[in-house]
Image (cartoon, rainbow, N blue to C red):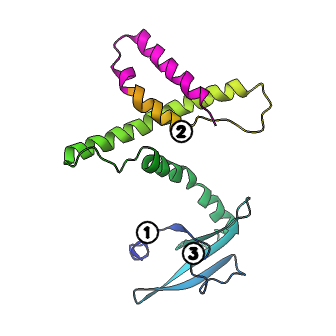
Amino acid sequence: MYLYESNVKFVIRIPKNSYKKLIDPSLSDQIVRFNKKGKSIHLRVLKFKLDSGIEEILVTNLMDEAMDVEAFKSLYFKRWGIETKYDELKNKLQIQKFTGDTPISIKQDFYASIFLSNMTSLVKQEADELIAKEQEPKELKHEYTVNMNILIGKLKNKLVQIILEKSPRKRKALYKKLMEEVIRNKN
C-alpha cells in the first residue's frame, strides 16, 4: 500500500497460492481489485511459466498496455543480478552482523563488508575469465565459474595481508596464490 500511495512504480513477485480467490487462473494478464486497510486499489496481475515449468505471478501498478506478459517476463529477469547481490551481502557476507554496537563500529563493519563485496566482484570477474580461457579448448556441458563461498572466505582471510604488503613483488605473488586457490575451487 505504501508504494502505491507514494506513486512508486513496482513489479513484485508473489507466491503462487497468494490471493487465489481474487486472481482468475485462466488469465495471464488481468486487473485485480485488492482491498487493504479499508482501501481499494487496482493492480495488474501477470502470470507466466518459466523455462523450468514453474509458474510465476507478478503484481504491478504499471498499467501500460504496450507492456505485454513477455515484456514483464524480461523485466522480471533483470532483477536477478540485484537479488543475487542481496543474497551475497546478507547470507554470504552477513552484512547485518556487527562486531560492536556503537555507531562507528557499525559503520566500519558496513563499509568493510561493502568494500569486500566490491573486491569480490573484481576478483570473481578476473578468475571467471581465467577459468573460461582454461576451458575454451575443452567441450564441456557446463560453464564453470568461481565458487563464491570459497572466494569470499579466501579474500576475507588474505585481502588485508595483500593490501598491507609493501613489496610489489610479494604482493603480486600473494595475489597470484589467492587466484590459483580460487580457480581450483570452481563450480
Q: Which quadrant holds residue 174?
A: top left
Closer to the N terminus: mark 3 or mark 2? 3
Which sits earlier in the primary sequence, circle 3 or circle 1?
1
- Residue wearing tag 1: 8
Circle 3: residue type: Met
* Secondary structure mostly seen in the magenta stretch: helix
Q: Secondary structure at mark 2?
A: helix
Q: x, y (%) of residue 15?
A: 58, 71
Q: Does residue 146 lie above or below 48 as drawn? A: above
Identify residue for label 2.
Answer: 148
* Magenta stretch contains residue 167: yes
Q: Nearer the viewer, residue 110 or 82?
A: 110
- The residue that disc 3 covers is 63
Along the horizontal axis of the image, is 164 left or right of 21?
A: left
Distance CA(mark 3)–CA(mark 1): 13 Å
Secondary element type, mark 1: loop
